[in-house]
Amino acid sequence: MSTVVTITGCGLAELTCAWLLAGRGHRVRQEADAPAAGARPLLLTGPTLDLLRSLWGDGLLGGAHLLRHRKVSWGPGEPSTRFAQPARVVDGAVLVDRMRERLAQAVTVSTDPARWVVTARAPDDPGGQRQVGRRRLLAGTALLRPGVDERTALLGTTALGWLQLTPLGRGDCLVQAMVPGPAEDAAELLARLLAESELGCVLRRAPDTAVAVPAAPRLHRTPASPPGEPSPTGRLTVGAGAIRYDPLSGTGTAQALRTAVLAAAVIDAEAVGTPATALCAHYTVRLHTAFVQHLRACSELYGTAFTSALWADELDTARLGFRTPGLPVAVV
């Protein structure tokens, strides 16, 4: 049975859900936001690349910068370890454009009322989210020194947080850092972290400008609601609007794609008679379980590297989040 679905937004998760639904014969109506302006570098490692290819096939990543290794020094006094980790750095805006072009050829448009809405928009009500922590991701771009290996990503730590340098090709480098709370001057703080780390020596200079964005793990409290409760149209939240992973995990893009797969499966199963209420409950439990597992992994990983008082509250919040029912909402 064919279902009419409205897709709101044009992120990777929304477009992937629309692609899967169209391939299964459902009628998809897009109400897309304008794509974000500017380049948006995404580092996609092996498992994410495999998942993306299994969903969309080949041809989306042409021109992406290829990485072959990762070099990691995690924790005070730890030596660097270089290991093979094939990955691609792709402009997220370009990837979205290619998905939209491919989707435009597969969508069956309908003017009938939608049975479901799929979106990656987070709820407007802050109480609708569980955000565990206050940490921020700092990000800017800088030039690599001549002769630096542009096929190896670098990861290191200081007392204040971690740093990652991701070569983008042609001498450019994405510089990212995680700190345990808000940052008033992102560029100044990023320069300070680079000065305290051995990684700073591979850059000509620190980024001239940088941004600081919220990056603590976040979960939508009710990512799925069936048709009729309280609206005649069911709602499925996907992508970062449903669940946001810590960017160090390297699984954020893969998790966004998985929410799209799961949302499409909910709509597909409801179309053949499975009760929507049970399907939405299953969707919610799956995301909540994944979130708790992610908090546990973050707590263990960060606990080995950050022992200063600056990180104490952040680590305690993560541990409380996966040990008690009803994850705490952070004060932002």
Image: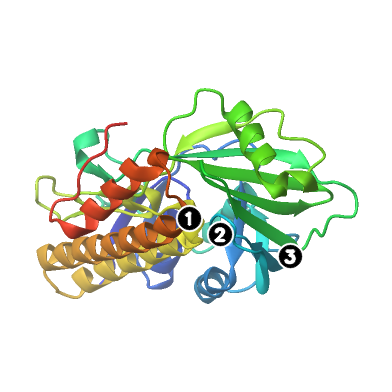
Left or right of residue 230: residue 250: right
User: Looking at the image, which residue is at 90% across and 49% down?
Assistant: 146
- Assign a secondary structure to mark 1: helix
- Name the residue tied to disc 3: 66
Left or right of residue 53: residue 225: left
From mark 3 to mark 1, how far is it between C-alphas? 29 Å
- Name the residue tied to disc 2: 74
Locate residue 284, reporting x and y percent. 20, 60
- Residue farthest top in this picture: 184
Locate residue 240, reporting x and y percent. 39, 50
Q: On the rendered image, what quadrant is the C terminus found in?
A: top left
Locate residue 53, reporting x and y percent. 56, 73
Can residue 30 be seen? yes
Question: Depth check: 279 or 68 in front?
Answer: 68
Position of 70 relative to 104 (above/below): below
Question: Depth check: 328 or 6 in front?
Answer: 328
Amino acid tagged 3:
Leu
N-terminal label among 2 and 3: 3
- Name the residue tied to disc 1: 305
Q: Which of marks 2 and 3 is in front?
A: 2
Left or right of residue 131: residue 86: right
Amino acid tagged 2:
Trp
N-terminal label among 2 and 1: 2
- Assign a secondary structure to mark 3: strand
From mark 2 to mark 3, how far is it between C-alphas? 24 Å
Position of 105 relative to 199 (above/below): below
Counting the numbered discs, the total is 3
User: Looking at the image, which residue is at 51% across and 61% down?
Assistant: 250
Identify the image quadrant of residue 49.
bottom right
Contact check, label 3 and label 1, Cβ < 8 Å: no
Amino acid tagged 1:
Ala
Contact check, label 2 and label 1, Cβ < 8 Å: yes
